[in-house]
Image (spheres, rainbow, N blue to C red):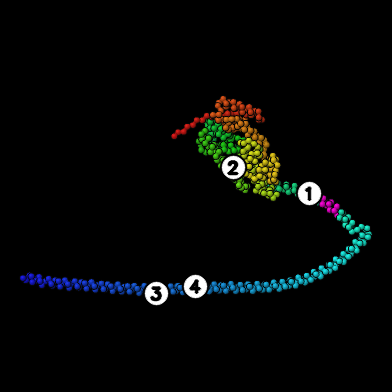
Amino acid sequence: MSQELYLLISIPIAFLVGYIVAKWLIESKIGGSKAQAEKIIAQAEKESELQLKESQANILKEEIKIRDEISKEKQRHEGEIRKKENEIHKEELKLKDIQNDIKVQKDEVQKKEKEIKSKEQSIEDRKRHLIEKQELVDVKYQEALDKLEKISGLTKEEVLEELKEHLITDAKNSVAKLIKEVKDEARETADREAKEIVVSAIQRTAADHSADTTLSVVNLPNDEIKGRIIGREGRNIRSFEQATGIEVIVDDTPGAVVLSGFDPYRRAIAKNALEKLIQDGRVHPGKIEEVVEKSKKEMEALIKEIGNDTVIELGVHNLHPEIIKLLGRLEYRTSYGQNVLLHSVECAKLCGLMATEMGYDTKLAVRAGLLHDIGKAVDQYQEGTHVELGIEIARKYKEAKIVINAIASHHEDAAAMHPISTLVAAADAISSSRPGARRETLGNYLQRLEKLEAVAMEYEGVTKSYAIQAGREIRVLVENEDVDDARADMLAADIAQKIQEEMKYPGHIKVTVIREYRASGVAK
């Protein structure tokens, strides 16, 4: 019973105590929240005050900045106004000066007008006085004429007619004499000026004389390389001579071998090829053929470069690339010992100088002089004279008619249709006829070697022919399929017979026909 009563009393008390504790806790939380809220509000108010102060400070700065800008702008405008005022003041001063000048000029004009009026009055007075004098002279003249007619018994018309005839006769005699003097003086002057022009042109070009040779020397690093050049039983030297058409002379000369051949173009290829072989160190027939072919391609590029350098030097423009290439080939072409490219350049310069002195088209004259011997670049390989071939080339590549006529007439094969053609002929004669410019004996020798090769090339099956041993031997290369062994023997005899019939030469000429059979395969 007591326990139940205890429970009944303790339960309400527990509830009451729990209620009181819960209420206290809730009130404590509410109080803390209020304090925190008040703290946040106070902090916010403080931050607002700070932001307000910062805003006020920024506004103050902006006001100061705007005032500074307004002050600067005001000063600038004031400066511009002062500058404009100064300019206006200067203009006003200039206007005053101009007004003063105008006033002075006006006074001078008025003064000159007065002087002119005074001079006009003086002229009128003189004119009137002269008229009076003229009338008096006419009267006196008529009186004198009347007296003269009475004394001479001739009328006025008869005297004038006789005087006119006398004057005409004297005038004719004077004119004839004057014409003769003018002609003589013009002829002397023309001769003298022409000589001066030519001499001046020659002095200003002053090209070196050509020194042609039929030999080229290749320097060797040592004499041991000579054995490689010759090869076993001479096979290397034979292959080289066959590929280039140039004779290789290997003698006791230390550190050098000599290449002999009349064709400078072939000799240059051979020299280049031999130098490459010596540098490489591998000398055998296969390598020789490879290097010779490479040297030929390099030579083609070189002659193109030489042609370009030549036209640039002379200032000749718009030449066809093939003509430029042919000009480069002239570097390796000689005529009577004279280098044809040097001769052409010299003629071009002479033509240009003479044309300038005489008032003709200088550029056209230089072009005509440069191309007058262009046919010599191909006359060794094609039928026809160098003049005919040059005309054909010029027409093919659409050169001017004056240039074509200059080519046609420079050896008087055709009439000169323009003064520039005459200048080209004169320049050609000057360049080729100077002492030492050409050597007739060497020219004839080279022509004989060219003729010797041309005779062999006339036969069917012949691919190449090379004159060697200074013209004492000719080597003829034939197609293996077209010429058999028996035909090769007959061909050698036929060529020798034709040389004997058509050519004149000292001693004997050996004809060697080379027929080579080659078989090749490809390993894959």
Query: What is the crowding at mark 2: few (fewer than 14 residues within 10 Å), some, or many (at least 20)?
Result: few
Labels 2, 4: front one: 2
Disc nearer the start of the sequence (2/3):
3
Please identify the residue farthest to the left as the structure is shown: 1
Label 4 belongs to which residue? 72
Query: What is the crowding at mark 3: few (fewer than 14 residues within 10 Å), some, or many (at least 20)?
Result: few
**Residue 498 in the image, given as x and y percentages of width and height:** 63, 28
Label 2 belongs to which residue? 322
**Which element carries disc 2, helix, strand or loop?**
helix
Q: Is residue 413 visible?
A: yes
Labels 1, 4: front one: 1
Q: CA distance from mark 3 to mark 1?
A: 111 Å
**Residue 222 in the image, given as x and y percentages of width and height:** 54, 36
Q: Nearer the viewer, residue 29 or 1?
A: 1
Mark seen at residue 230? none
Magenta stretch: dominant SS? helix
**Which element carries disc 3, helix, strand or loop?**
helix
Label 1 belongs to which residue? 183
Q: Is residue 172 magenta?
A: yes
Circles 2 and 1 in contact, beta carbons < 8 Å: no
Q: Is residue 469 visible?
A: no
Read off the magenta span: 167-177
Amino acid type shown at disc 1? Lys
Which quarter shows the C terminus? top left
